[in-house]
Each structure stands twice: as C-alpha cells, then as structure tokens.
Image (cartoon, rainbow, N blue to C red):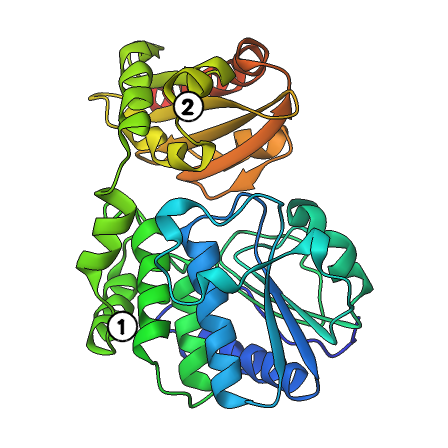
Amino acid sequence: MAEDRAQTQGAPQGDVEGLEEQERGFARIAALVEGAGEVAICAHTSPDGDALGSGLALALAIRERWPEKQVVNLLADDAPVPRIYRFLPGSDGFVRASEYDRVPDLFVVVDLSALSRLNNARPICEAAPHVAIIDHHPCEEPFGDAYVIRPEAAAAGVIVTEFVRFLGVEVTPDMAQCLFCAISTDTGRFQYQNADAEAFRVASGLVEAGANPALVSLNVYQSFRLQYLHLESLVLGRIVTFEKGRIAYSYATASDFERTGADLDESDGLIDDVRSVAGSEVALFLKEVPGGRVRGNLRSKGELDVAQVAQRVGGGGHKAAAGFTIEGDVDEAFSTVMPMLTELVEGAASEGEAE
C-alpha cells in the first residue's frame, strides 16, 4: 500500500479541517482513477440500497469524467440484484464477481471497510494493484491506497455525491436517482437517527438534479408481492419481547420461504416491522438462508449500540443498524445472540440507575 495514502475518517458539514481532509482523500482517489485503465467497483455481500445505488452512481460519474475508462460494477455474491432495486439505472449491468476473470487496475470498495464482507470479490480486491474505499461504517484499520471513511455520514451515497461534485461532474438524473435511493433506504425513509441535516441537504440537491422520490418509494416500499405479504404476516404473528419489552424479536425459517414463495431479498425490510413495537429499544430479526446459515438484522431506536453485538459474531454495521451471518438454524442463532442483546440492555439499565 502507498505510504502517502490519503485518509479521511470524519468530515462533518461545516468542519473546515474535516472537509479539507475529505478533499485530500477525494484527490487521491481521483488520481488512482486517472491512472487506471480498468476500474472495478464493488460493495458488501447481501447489498442493500445504499451499496447498490452508491456503486452505480460512482460508475456513472467515472464514465462521465473519464469516458475512456473501462468501469464494471461487481456483485460480491452469486445472487442477482434484489428485485426492489432493479429499477435503478444501470442495475442490469452488474457482473458477478465469481464470473469476472480479470484483474482491474483499481478496485473501489463502496459502503464497506472490511475485506471479509467482500465474499467472492475478495480475491479480486487482493489481486488489484490499487484499492480505494468510500464508506461510512466505523473502521479502526482501513486498508487501501486511498480512502474516505466518514461514519458521521448518513449513507455512502452522501459521500459519493460529494465525490461526484468534487470531480466537477454534473449530477445527471440517473446518478441522482441512484444516490437518492441510497440515502433514502439507509435512513429508513429519513426516519432513523442518522437522518441529519446533511442527509436532507444532499437529498434535496439530488431531487433538484432529477431524482424521483416517488419512484423510489413505489419500487422499494410499495410493490410487495403477495408471497412476501404472506411471509410478513407470519413474522408479525411471531413477534415477542424480552427484558420488559425492551427487546423485540421475530424470525423466518427456510420452510417459511418455501411455503409462502417469498424470496430472501424481499425480506430485508421485515426488521422494521419488528423495530416498530412500542416500547422496544432494540430489535432482532433472524432468517434462515441457504447453506445452513442464519442472517440476522439488528436495529436500535436510541443510544444502544447494536453494532458491537454484530461484531461479536463476525458481522458489522452502525450503532443503530447492523447485521451478521452465522452458521446454524434460527434456534441456534437466537441462543447465541439473545444473551448478548440482554447483556447490552441490562448494561444500559445499570448505567442509568447508577446515574
């Protein structure tokens, strides 16, 4: 890795020093793109709206600024783009990392700072001569030749938007649509704790540039198949609470997906149903996925940090939203994770009593 790698880990709006650091990070990333013939862009395994939208917009911006570059958007998994995000411009151009047989001059990691979550794309990243990162997840030991990692940003889409403007590229309607989807989904339709003033300012500019919020809402939140709604009914009927209502929990088994006909990628929003229980402070949703594994989603409504729980089982994320994948079935995953959540909640209660 280059010894003079540029770095930014915190550049809040209005913080002159932080913004200058971000500019230096952007300049270093731009220089890497300038020197590359082929650029591969990839996000984390099980990509969400932020991962997909940010990656697509970044590719569009690079092609606009450097038409001669070869730019490819990779999927870390063999699974296709989730149905609800296939309306995004360029979503039909993704290439599975397992089917990509070249070594790019530059590998750009978006919405991710951990090699372990690149899945099939990890060997490509490790083989690339240069790596850049644009992310908003907390990271103690970033890798890469250049990176802009800003945990204060509501979404990777916020940082990518700022990078596009740094390049002097006009935000096209297609870029704006992808980036608005990224920010809207990662803030839970601007309902989560991370929906700050910067997120609204950037989103407003994207609408002015041509983003259609109604189209995002229609595809992501208002186009559920009956199969999914039947699965949702099962999950809603199973919601239970622990620790005097402070922890809300539900799950979906492999047989539930088979019986209802719902797809795995349709179920990402079910954690929000569990999170909506009145009085709950943290929420856990578990679903069985192929290969004898369980994927878990965690949410926090307040100050409790669920990312630390996800990290203990090999996952990651943010203080208020995190996830993980572990071996076993739902019962085994519940037995592993619930004691950690209980410890988290009880620890916060003890601190509150001490104060």
* Vertical comparison of 140 with 103: above or below: above
Is 254 in front, or is 130?
254
Question: Considering the image in quadrants, where does the C terminus appear?
Answer: top left
Give the foreground label among 2 and 1: 1
Amino acid type of the residue tagged 2 in the rendering? Leu
Residue 224, located in which quarter of the rendered image?
top left
Q: How would you rate the neighbour count of disc 1 (Cα within 10 Å): few for under 14, some for 14-19, many for 20 or more?
A: many
Residue at position x 66%, y 25% in the image? 291
Tag 2 residue:
284
Q: How many marks?
A: 2
* Vertical comparison of 95 with 65: above or below: above
* Vertical comparison of 90 with 241: above or below: below
Q: Secondary structure at mark 1?
A: helix
Give left or right: position of 204 versus 310: left
Q: Earlier in the sequence, mark 2 or mark 1?
A: 1
Residue at position x 42%, y 55% in the image? 50
Question: Considering the image in quadrants, where does the N terminus appear?
Answer: bottom right
Tag 1 residue:
206
